Image (cartoon, rainbow, N blue to C red):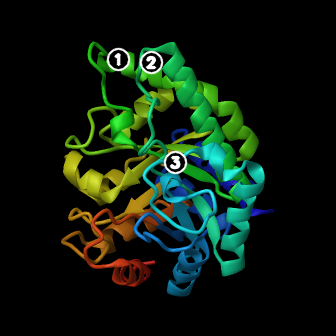
Amino acid sequence: MDRRDFFKKSMMLAAVAGMGSSLNSLKAAAESQNVKMKLSMCNEMYVGWSMEKQFAFMAEAGYDGAELAPYSITPDLNHGDPETFDLKSLGGLSAYKKIGKLAEKAGIEVAGLHCLLTRTEGYHLTSPDKEVQKRTAAYLSELTRFCGEAGGVYMVLGSPKQRKLLPGVSMPDAYDYAAIVLDQVRPVLEKEGVVLALEALAPNENEFIQTGRDALFLIEKMGCPKEIAIHLDCKAMFASEKESIPTIIRDKKLHPYMKTFHANDANLQGPGFGKLDFAPIMGALKEIGFQGWIGVEPLDFTPGADRLTKESIATLKKYM
């Protein structure tokens, strides 16, 4: 069983476990598959680094995979952080596969993508405009092909600017429009074996989907498709949720859909760089038998790429 088939099977196991079952069912599902949590590093802080250097550095630090921001990749795959990003300029599936091969050569995987709509123009998740909906769905579908061909298994849909409520759009309408867009992406997600995870973001970033339960509402509205999941982010949970992060992780209603997780501090740096205690956070993930990827996503790069890369994983591995 390859890792893509395993990821699909783990989704099915979690879904079954979530149908009124207990924490023990989730733990048994994980243990029966000898599941171990995997760690990935988000790549946008490696400004100016070649893809080869990024992957090699992550692998040397001990990460299992890389979580890529599409905007950080240029057509020749040699430098990061362009001002604009055109997916077609990558050259199609051969270039997507090349990225996966570069990661494989370094000894890691392309785990998935995030910042899907960041630094783009003309796309919006909650727009009432049918042409914008269609265009956004087409772009997310192409990103899905990118992810799948590179070997990734998930995409994190954050991008607060591209999902904020537009003038005249109510919250119920926003959920309707988002469902329309995502329904169009589902066939490609299924074909590529990729999960699209809805990221709950803090109120200061966005008003649409601020909690895990908000993400669950949209998933249930869509009929609980297996291709749509929930993504929890530590700094967002700290800012937007009333309960503690471990308590949210233990929310049984979220378990069947929790496929990805971002480990970062409330200060926007990596684990161990701020006041969040990752011992109970990692403990809660182990307790529920979490089977997904844990991505380190620093947003404040002040300590530098070297320290953020190495010290973040050291903090997490203490509790794994």
Q: Amino acid at mark 1?
A: Pro
**10 Å neighbourhood of mark 1: few (<14), some, or many (≥20)?**
few
Lower sequence index among marks 2 and 3: 3
Residue 2: percent from the left, percent from the top? 78, 63
Q: Which residue is mark 1?
A: 172
Q: Amino acid at mark 2?
A: Asp
Q: Amino acid at mark 3?
A: Phe
Visible in this render: residue 240? yes
Residue 160 sits above or below residue 89 on the image = above
Nearer to us in this view, 181 or 50? 50
Q: Which residue is mark 2?
A: 176
Cα separation, mark 1 vs mark 2, equals 6 Å
Q: Which residue sits furthest right? A: 1
**10 Å neighbourhood of mark 3: few (<14), some, or many (≥20)?**
many
Q: Which residue is mark 3?
A: 85
Residue 303 sits above or below residue 153 on the image = below
Q: Are marks 1 and 2 in contact (CB under 8 Å)?
A: yes
Secondary structure of the residue carrying tag 1 is helix
State the residue at coordinates (42%, 52%).
83
Residue 217 sits above or below residue 110 on the image = above
Cα separation, mark 2 vs mark 3, equals 28 Å
State the residue at coordinates (40%, 77%).
316
